[in-house]
Amino acid sequence: MGLFSKFIAKIKGTNDFSPSDWAELEQELLASDLGPTLTKNLLEKAKKVKSDNAELALIEILTSSLSKNSHEPVVVSGTTTIMVVGVNGTGKTTSVAKLASYYKKSGKSVVLAAGDTFRAAAVDQLNTWGSRIGVLVISGKDNGDPASVAFDGAKSAHDSASDIFIIDTAGRLHNKNDLMAELSKVKRVVEKVSPINEVLLVIDATTGQNGLQQAKIFTECVEVTGIVLTKLDGSAKGGVALAIEAELGIPIKWVGTGESESDFSLFDAQSYIKGLLS
């Protein structure tokens, strides 16, 4: 059931909501990871909705909360360089592989850099994916310098005139400052070869408001241009996507709903909004 389905059912019959009705809706929205700021704004607008056009009005309200920035992936002439960041456990490395698969199937040449060198499993995972989908994976030694791996990958992508270069990055170091410093270093080193065109932050939709906090932290460090939202199944858990777009203006660009390659697609705002209402 969508976030607003119960509300629509009620408001179609009457405009006479009691304070307890609004309080109930507020609790539902907060529990759906929309956050206090967006919940307050949505309630203020919802109270002005008339019963005869409740669903259309809510679609307009929710659509207006989405980021005004483009939801389309950035693609440039020459090599498009994409840096993928996020905390461990969000599905970051898997998302890198799915992204590579998407572009490979669309006829693009792809190079990957296994930059999460502090997690051997991530490097092995990316190499396995690379063999499966037929793309080159540049990797280094365990616990090696992630920036060095990213630089080698950038050189390889540039020299081979590849269409897409995607960098997997570390998701956890000793502390937050170390992680942010490392990501900044990777970005600086890669840009000696070519500019980074897109920084995608992977957010697990089931983490709720923690996802919004992660978006704030990473954006301060590496200027995130888009979100990859994983484990989005169209239920109330996807409310964090609306919160990120409304509060930070960062567009959701990709959506992952499962483990297979096919469970990955471009974010469709209309489908997402309809899912919240259905």
Image (tube, grey):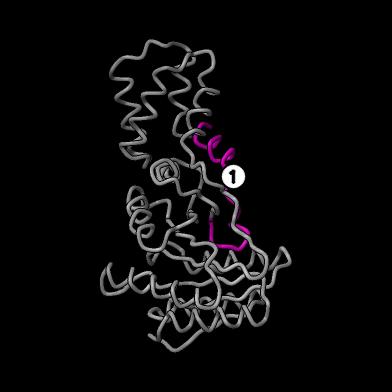
Relative to 23, is 167 on the left or the right? Answer: right
Secondary structure under tag 1 reads loop
Inspect the image, locate mark 1, and give the three-letter code of the amino acid beneath it. Answer: Asp
Residue at the right extreme? 107
Does 96 lie within the magenta span?
Answer: no
Q: 215 above or below 85?
A: above
Does 267 lie within the magenta span?
Answer: yes
Residue 53: x and y, percent? Answer: 54, 17
Q: 193 above or below 278?
A: below
Q: 120 above or below 176?
A: below
Mark 1 neighbour class, 10 Å CA radius: few under 14, some 14 to 19, many 20 or more: some
Residue at the front extreme? 192
Q: Name the residue under label 1.
A: 268
Residue 155: x and y, percent? Answer: 57, 82
The residue that appears at 42% across and 40% down in the rendered structure is 246
Q: Foreground: 235 or 178?
A: 178
Residue 116: x and y, percent? Answer: 43, 76
Span highlighted in magenta in the image: 256-278
Residue at the bottom extreme? 141
The residue that appears at 28% across and 67% down in the rendered structure is 176
Residue 257: x and y, percent? Answer: 53, 54
